[in-house]
Image (cartoon, coloured by chain):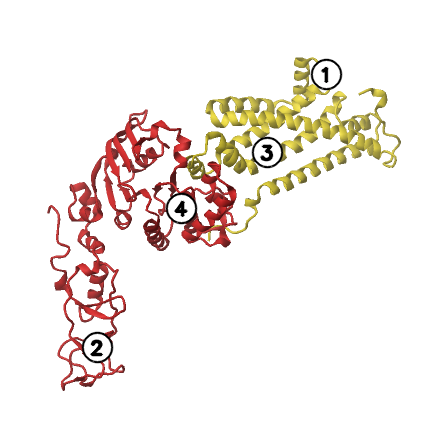
Chain colours: A yellow, B red
Amino acid sequence: MLLASVPEWSGAQLSGNWGVIVHYAVIHVQLALAALLLGCIGALILGLLSFRYRRVYAVVLAFSNAVYAMPSLGLLFIIAAITGRILDDHPLIIALALYTLTILVRNIVEGLRAVPPAVTDASSAMGFTRRGRLLKVELPLAVPAISAGLRVATVSTISLVSVAGIIGRGGLGFLLTQGFQKDNPWEIWAGVLATVALAGIIDVLLVVATRAVTPWRRIGVRNG
Amino acid sequence: MIALEAVSKVYPDRTVAVESLDLVVESATVTVLVGPSGCGKTTTLRMINRMIEPSSGRITIDGKDIATQPAAQLRRGIGYVIQSAGLFPHWRVIDNVCAVPDLLGQDRKTSRARALELLELVGIGSEMAKRYPAQLSGGQQQRVGVARALAADPPVLLMDEPFGAVDPLVRTQLQHDFLELQRQLRKTVVFVTHDIDEAIILANKVAVFGEHGHLHQYASPADLLAQPADEFVNRFLGGDRQLRLLSLLPVDQIPIAPATEIKLGDTIDAGGPVQWTLVISPERRPLGWLAPGGAAGVVSESSTMVPVTPVGPGSNGRSLLDAVLASPAATAVRVDHEGLLLGVVTMENFVGHPAPTGPR
C-alpha cells in the first residue's frame, strides 16, 4: 500500500468524507477478520489438545494469561522485533490473533467439558469413535460457549485494530491519530463511531449465525 | 448367550471392583444384576460392551470373544440404555433413535421409517419425533432411550438403572411396558439395578452381588426368595420374602373353595342369612355380599349388599391375599376371564403357600 494512494480526510465536516471512512473500514475489517481467523484456528488446535491432555491445558492457560496481561502495544513491538517487519501488517495480525486465541481457547475447552457426562457416555456406548464423538456430539454442543467467546474476541479485536493506528497501521485507527494531529473532532468521532458500528454489526451477525446453527436451544419447554 | 469367565477388574490404585466372576446369561432372557452401590454390578455391565476393559478373564457373546473386535464396532451391535437417558440434546428425537443405524451407514429413509415404528412400540407418538429431548418428560426421554438402543436391532441389550431417575408411578409403568416389549422382542438383556423389587419383577434370573463383585447367588426370582443362599442375600431381600414370593405366584396356583351363594330372585328364610352370602346373577356374575343377620325375603338388585371386588386370572397371589384382607367377609372372590364366579379364597387356602420357606 503506497502512502500516495491513501485518502485524506478534508475539512471540518462529514460530507465528502464517506469514501474515506469506507476505505479505512474495509481495511479494518480485513485486518480483524484475518486475525480472528488465525486466532480461531490456533484456538481450535490448542483447545482440542487441551481438552484431551490435561497437562497441555495447564501450559496453554499460563501462556494465555501472560499474553492477555501484556499491553497490546508492547506485544505488537515484541512481535515486530521477532518477525522483523514493523512496516507491514503481519506483526499486527499475529498480535491480534494471539489475543483472540487466548480468549477463545478457554471457551472451547470449557464448552467441551460442559457436555453432560451421560451424553458422552451414551455416545461412546453406541459406538461412536473418539473423532466421531468430537465432531458430531461434543463440538456441536460446545457451540454456544465457543460462540460466546468468539463474540468477546471479535469486539475486542475490532477495537484493538484501532490501537494499531498509533504505529501507523490499521484501519479506522488512522482517523483517530490523524484527527488528533490535525485537531479535527469530526475525523476523530467518525473513527470512534465507525469502529463501534463495525463491532456492533459483526456481533449481531455472530448472534444470528449462532442461533441458526443451534436450533435446539430455542425451544421454550423444559422437562414437564 | 453372554458368558463371563473368571472376569476381574482391578484399578491401578488396586481397588478391586470385580473379582474372578463367572456368569452365564442365557439368550432371550432378562438377567438382573442387583446389589448395594459399589458392588461392581455396573462395572460388570460396562465390561460387556468394553466401556471398561477387564483386567483379566474372558467375555464371549455367542461364543465370540469380545476382545477380538474393535470396541466401537462391538458397541454398535449392543443396545445400551442409561439412567439419565443420555439423549443428544442437539438432535431431534427421531435422529437420536437413528444414531446407531446412521453410524452403520444404513439407508436414512428406511431407518427413519423403522424408528417411527420403534417409537410407537415404546409408547412415543410420531408427533414427538420432530421434538428435541428437552421438550420431553423424563419418562418419555427414557422411552426414547430404549427405542434408540433397539434401533439397529441388536441381539443384546444392556440397561444401567434405566428407570432409576423417574418417579415411582412412571417407573411402574415403564417396568410393565418393558416386560411387554421383551415378550415381543426377546432380547438378551442384562439389567443393573439396586432395587430388589425391580429385580424380582423384571428378571428371569437375578444375580445378587456383594462387595468386589462377589456373586452371592444367581437364581430365578422364585428360587432366590424361597432359598436365599446366605445371610447376605437374606438381608438384601428384606423381611417380607414370603409376601414377595406370593407376588410371583399366579392366582390359579392357590386352591379355591365353593362359595356360600345365592342367586338373584331366590328367597332367604326368616331370620336372614346365617353367614356371609355371595349374591350372583343368573349367569353367575358375583354382585355383592349379604351380611349375616340381614333382612329375609327375596334377593333383588336393590337388596343391601356389601360390594365385591373379584380377582380375575392374570393376577398374583399377593393381590389375592390383599383382596381377602380387604373383604368384610375375609373372603376373596375369584372369577374367570368373563367375570363369572369360580369360587372363593380365604386365609386357610394360603396355608402351605408358598410352600418352600428357605433355610430357616
- How dense is the environment of label 2, judged by Cα within 10 Å: few (below 14), some, or many (20 and up)? many
| Residue with the mark numbered 4 | B146
CA distance separating discs 1 and 3? 29 Å
Residue located 19% across and 45% down the image: B235
Name the element at disc 4: helix
Q: Are marks 2 and 3 in contact (CB under 8 Å)?
A: no
CA distance separating discs 1 and 2? 107 Å
Q: Give the mark nearer the N terminus: 2 vs 4.
A: 4
- How dense is the environment of label 4, judged by Cα within 10 Å: few (below 14), some, or many (20 and up)? many
Q: Nearer the viewer, residue B322 or B38?
A: B322
Say which quarter of the image contains residue B229.
top left
| Residue with the mark numbered 3 | A149
Q: Give the mark nearer the N terminus: 1 vs 3.
A: 1
- B162 relative to B293 in the view: left or right: right
* Label 1: chain letter: A
| Residue with the mark numbered 2 | B279
